[in-house]
Image: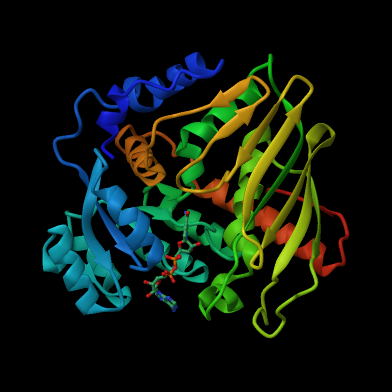
Amino acid sequence: MNTSKLSRRRFIRNSSLAASAAVLAQRLWGADAPATPPAKKLGVALVGLGSYATGQLAPALLETKLCELKGVVTGSPAKGAAWAKNFNFPAKNVYGYDTMDRLADNPDIDIVYVVTPNALHAESVIKAAKAGKHVISEKPMATNVADCDAMIAACKAAKRSLSIGYRLHFDPYHQKMMSLAADPNFGPFTKMSGENGFTLNGDQWRIHHPLSGGGPLMDMGIYVVNEACMATNANPVAVTAKERPKLRPDFFKDVEEALDWTMEFPGGVTATCQTSYVQNYGHFHADSAKGWIDFPSAFNYVGLQLNTSNGKVAFPPYRQQTLQLDGIVQSILDKKDSIVPGELGRRDMIIIEGIYASAAAGGKRVELKYT
Ligand code: NAD
C-alpha cells in the first residue's frame, strides 16, 4: 500500500486512544514526510535473495517514496538477471558476493541492504561500506559482539550510516507502546513478559550454528529482547537464562531448541521471556502502576492489535518494511542519526551473549556491560 494513501485515510475512532493515535499517525505519515520527495529516489541493492528479501523487502521497495530497488548481490547470476528484468534495473547492477567491491563504481546504488544468514552479515556490510555505500543489516546484526564492532568501525571509517533492519521501531503500534510507557499518566512499565517462536521444520542454515550463531534466541527471541528495551527505554543490567530440554535433539544438534530468560532493568523492573523453534507464539505484555498493555501477535508483520487498560488501539493497514525503509532513508537524507543504528544491534548482541553465557552456566545471573 502506498503510504500517501495512508496519510489520507481516516483512523478508526473506536477507542479512547483514538485521538492520540491520530496524532501519532500524522507524525508518521504526515508532518514528518518530506513536502516533496527527493528528485531521485535513493537506489537500494539487496544482498541475498532469500525468503525475506523476496517476500517482504522487494514488495516494500515497490511502495517506498524515498528509495527503490536498483540492484542485487546474489550467488546466482540467473536469479540476478530475473530480478533485473522484473524490477526494471540494468543487468550491470547484478553483483556476486565476490564482486561487491565493484559497487564503488556504481552511482545507481546508494544503500546496500544485507539479508543473508546471520554469520555472513559482517562480511557483506564491511564490503559495502568499503565501496562507499550506506548499509542496512538484517537482524541479528551479527553472531558476536566482535563482528558488530568491526561493522560499526567500517561504516565510521567510510563515513556511511549503518542501520539494523529493526522494523518494529517504525511500526505505529510499537511506537504507541513506547509513547504510553513514556507518558507519566500511564507508564513507566515495571513488569513485562514476552514470547516469540515458531515451529521450524526442514534443514536450513538456522539450525547450523556456524551460519546462525544460535537457535531461536538469535532469530525470534531477539524481538522480545528488543521490545523490553523499547518498553523501558533502558538497557538491562543483568540476565538469567535456562535452555529447555530438547524434544528433537536429533534435529537441533548444535543450537538451542527453546530458551527461557529474565532481564533485569534498573530500578527492579523485570522482563520474563521465552523463545522456541517448537512452538508457534508471539506475545508481549507490560504492566505499570497505572495501566497495562497487551500485544497479541506482537512481532508479526501484519494484523497487529494493541490492547491497553485505556482501550484498544487501531491503525489502518500498512507494510512495516515500507515504513522502515523510508524511515531509514529519511535519516540518511536529513544527515541525522538512524533510530536503529549499529550500536543498537551491538547492544542486543551483548544481551544475547549474556543470555547464552547464563544458560551455559546453568542459569547463573550474568551482569551486562555495554562498553
Ligand atoms: P533465507 O534462507 O530465505 O535466505 C538467505 C539468502 O542468503 C539466500 O538467498 C541464500 O542463497 C543466501 N546465502 C548466501 N550465502 C549463503 C550461505 N552460505 N548459506 C545459505 N544461504 C546463503 O533466509 P531469510 O529468512 O531470508 O533470512 C535472511 C536474514 O534476514 C537473516 O539474518 C534473518 O534473521 C533475517 N530476517 C529478518 C526478518 C525480519 O522480520 N526483520 C524476517 C526474516 C528474516
Horizontal side, residue 357 vs residue 12: left or right: right
What sort of colour scheme is used for the picture? rainbow
Q: Is residue 129 visible?
A: no
Which residue is the extreme one toward the front? 14
Q: Residue, x 44% and y 48% (percent of image)?
A: 163
Q: Position of residue 246 (x, y in %)?
A: 76, 75
Q: How many marks?
A: 0
Q: Residue, x 82% and y 32% (percent of image)?
A: 267
Q: Residue, x 46% and y 18% (percent of image)?
A: 13
Which residue is the extreme one toward the bottom? 250
Q: Is residue 23 above or below residue 313?
A: above
Give the image quarter of residue 221.
bottom right
Give the image quarter of residue 197.
bottom right
Q: Is residue 340 above or below residue 222?
A: above
Q: Residue, x 59% and y 53% (percent of image)?
A: 346
Horizontal side, residue 40 vs residue 202: left or right: left
Q: Position of residue 257 (x, y in %)?
A: 69, 70
Horizontal side, residue 242 vs residue 136: left or right: right
Q: In front here: 347 or 221?
A: 221
Q: Quadrant of the N terminus?
A: top left
Q: Is residue 110 visible?
A: yes
Ligand 1's image quarter is bottom left
Q: In front here: 7 or 212?
A: 7
Q: Position of residue 150 (x, y in %)?
A: 51, 61
Q: Position of residue 51 (x, y in %)?
A: 39, 65
